[in-house]
Image (cartoon, grey):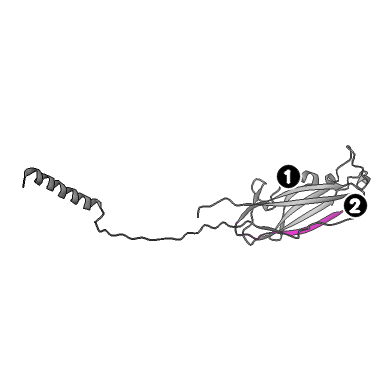
């Protein structure tokens, strides 16, 4: 056999060997595990009972009305705070709502109390008119340090009792313009979730 044929046969054998190596002819150990994972979002669900908190008539200056209602976390997530938004419309019976007429809501004092362990903590005390520009947290409790309040929140399944005092303030003056007037008050309760945590 000639030299050229020997070299060419050697190269062919080497190429075949390399191709077998690269072709995956090796045996090796392996192990495979599969996990099934679930990510489910919780629910934020606030219930207020009763749905109509106040429905009274024939008020006169000096009258006070007390009402109770409950707020319940019916969801699966912690509620960090419950902000109260107020909006109202005046039904002017005598149609005396001139530009200089007084707002009936300015004469209704509202005191909101958070009931905790048979004790009450004041959350807000203001007029119905001023309450429109405020958003008190109904879960706020006394901090007893620095005189402020801190949010208490509402855990899933937890219920808090809120007491509201309404007073038609007698200012000692002529309040005849309010005779027959009515207030249609809308309270919107905005529940906010607690901050996310590392699980």
Residue 100 is a magenta residue: no
What residue occupies the far bottom of the structure in this picture? 157
N-terminal of the two: label 1 or label 2?
Answer: 2
Taking 119 as reference, is 88 left or right? Answer: right
Depth check: give the residue in front, 46 or 133. 46
Task: Tell me the residue at 75%/56% (across/down).
Answer: 163
Q: Which residue is mark 1?
A: 134
* Foreground disc of the pair 1, 2: 1
Residue 73 located within the stretch drawn in magenta: yes
Quadrant position of residue 48:
bottom right
Task: State the CA–CA distance, disc 1 to disc 2.
Answer: 26 Å
Q: Is residue 142 above or below residue 100?
A: below
Q: Which residue is mark 2?
A: 60
Q: In the rendered view, does 32 fall on the left or right side of 21?
A: right
Q: Residue at x 83, y 46 (%)?
A: 105
Looking at the picture, how far across and down is residue 69, in whole percent?
A: 75, 59
Q: Position of residue 60 (x, y in %)?
A: 90, 52
Residues shaded magenta: 60-77
Mark 1, Cα crowd under 10 Å, few <14 / some 14-19 / many 20+, is some
């Amino acid at each position: 056999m000639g030299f050229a044929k020997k070299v060419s046969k050697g190269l062919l054998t080497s190429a075949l060997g390399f191709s077998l190596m690269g072709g995956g002819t090796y045996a090796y150990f392996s192990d495979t595990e599969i996990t099934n994972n679930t990510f489910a979002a919780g629910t934020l669900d606030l219930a207020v009972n009763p749905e109509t908190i106040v429905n009274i008539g024939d008020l006169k200056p000096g009258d006070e009305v007390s009402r109770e209602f409950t707020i319940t976390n019916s969801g699966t997530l912690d509620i960090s705070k419950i902000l109260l938004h107020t909006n109202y419309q005046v039904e002017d019976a005598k149609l005396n709502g001139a530009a200089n007429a007084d707002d009936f809501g300015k004469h209704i004092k509202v005191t909101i109390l958070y009931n905790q362990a048979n004790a009450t903590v004041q959350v807000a005390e203001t007029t119905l008119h001023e309450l429109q520009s405020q958003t008190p947290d109904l879960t706020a409790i006394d901090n007893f340090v620095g005189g402020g309040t801190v949010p208490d929140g509402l855990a899933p399944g937890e219920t808090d009792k809120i007491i509201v005092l309404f007073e038609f303030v007698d200012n000692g003056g002529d309040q005849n313009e309010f005779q027959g007037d009515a207030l249609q008050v809308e309270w919107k309760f905005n529940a906010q979730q607690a901050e996310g945590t590392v699980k």
